[in-house]
Amino acid sequence: MAGDLHGLIAGFLQAMTHAELSEAPRQIAGLVVPNAEGLSKRQRIDLALANLTQEELARLALQFAGHRGDIALDEAGRKVLEAGDPPLTHITRRDVARVFGDDLAGERGTVEMVERYFPLSSPLEDFLGSGGRSLRDQVAQHMDRNPGDWSVEYLFGEIGAFDCSRARFGALLEEAVHPLSRLGEEQSQTVGALNKVLARDGYELAQESELSGHPIFAFRPLVRGVSGRPKNLIFASRGPKPEIGFADAINNDIVILSGEESCLVYDRPIGANGLLWSELVAWWSDVTPGANAANLGARLQESLASDAERKLFATYFKAYRTALGEALPALLPQVYLHYDPAIVKTLRHRLPLPRQRMDFLLLLPGRQRVVLEVDGKHHFSENDHPSLKVYSDMVSDDRELRLAGYEVYRFGANELVGQGAESRIADFFEKLFRLHRVRQ
């Protein structure tokens, strides 16, 4: 596959002039093609691609394919990136087709839907004496003008849906259950039937947003995320614990009664895609006129309690802000998990809630909430003496978080300072993002 991918990318670049090779690949995908006197175009291309990993080639392929609308190049790249993921088998795809029967597109045209993801314009040879009609003509004839001529299972065979990348297959399913295709009970029943089939291979269609009050679904791996949606984020605490009340208890609208200056409260809707840094910056700019990303970063750093936490925070943005751009998840420091009101001090019949604050929180796609804890000696000791009770309370809290669907990762403070700290932090986030498919 890597060899095929190399050849496809080389073919894409080979069609450019020498002058275009010096500019276009860099502008499209950040690829620098060496320019030296006497080198042929092929030599320049081979030098540019020589030391790239299989994954780097795949990401180049996606960027070049998006620029030119090249489905073959896009497919080659996606199959490389999907190689380590659970397969979506031919059997599952067949049973998905059977859920639809002979109606894939619902209220839309089948051609309109399918040709966004599959090439339909090449003439079919020797197809039941079709006389060289294109696949597009065949689909229009047997799916749109004469519904019922072809089953969706037959259509999948003709367009290559049984063998395409999971991303392409998933995108087609998203279109088939989009509100423009199906509404109300039909949409709900179709999604339910599809999810029973997809779950066998570890995938699902999950609601990620709405359009005019109608659910929009996204194809994704079946994940064990946290149930419910985040409603209020109280974070970046840098002083006394704030006192909070409800401005509207029915709507869960909160108001800070005192200590407002010590924390930030993000109260905008957070969907299934999690919370991005760009969204946090947009919110900050609205609530703090004239502020920008740099101001927000400085404010968040004020809440960090140790050199280890500061190193983790700084390395995260140094390593990924440019690489991920608009897709960068927000790294939230000092986030309140439980909240006991001030009156708890007067309630002697119960203890306050444990683990009230998390060092860092990431809200990732698929309802995934990732907690990062930086452990200093106070996590294992009391009054500078080792304490089994303190340690036991900590691991008990971790268990409860995991059972609630959170992921918890702990760092020893010593790991995050000194030689090798940056590479250790970057390696962790690289593996975490790969696990959660943040870059795809």
Image (cartoon, rainbow, N blue to C red):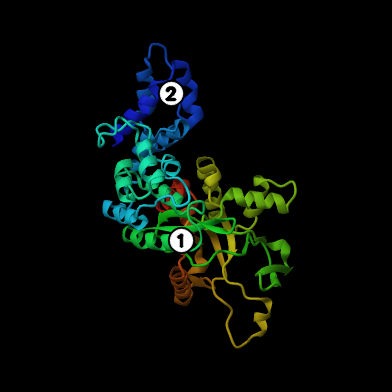
Q: In which quadrant is the N terminus drawn?
A: top left
The answer to whether residue 283 of the structure is visible from this angle is: yes
Evaluate if marks 1 and 2 touch, with contact meaning CB atoms under 8 Å apart. Answer: no
Q: Neighbour class for label 1 at 10 Å: few (<14), some, many (≥20)?
A: few
In this rendering, the count of numbered labels is: 2
Q: Is residue 394 above or below residue 269?
A: below
What amino acid is at disc 1? Glu
Outermost residue on the front side: it is 146
Task: Report the side of 238 relative to 355 (left or right).
Answer: right
In the structure shown, which secondary structural element does the residue marked by tag 1 occupy?
helix
Residue topped by disc 1: 186
In the structure shown, which secondary structural element does the residue marked by tag 2 occupy?
loop
Q: Nearer the viewer, residue 371 or 18?
A: 18
Outermost residue on the bottom side: it is 349
Image quadrant assignment for residue 119? top left
Q: Neighbour class for label 2 at 10 Å: few (<14), some, many (≥20)?
A: many
Q: Percent x, y for residue 102?
A: 35, 52
Q: Nearer the viewer, residue 176 or 412?
A: 176
The answer to whether residue 241 of the structure is visible from this angle is: no
Q: Residue at image x 48%, y 72%?
A: 397
Label disc, if present, on residue 269 of the rendered structure: none
Q: Is residue 48 above or below residue 334?
A: above
Residue topped by disc 2: 33
Image quadrant assignment for residue 252? bottom right
**First in sequence: mark 1 or mark 2?**
2
> In whole angstroms, how far apart are the C-alphas of marks 1 and 2?
52 Å
Q: Nearer the viewer, residue 12 or 115?
A: 115
Task: Report the side of 233 relative to 399 (left or right).
Answer: right
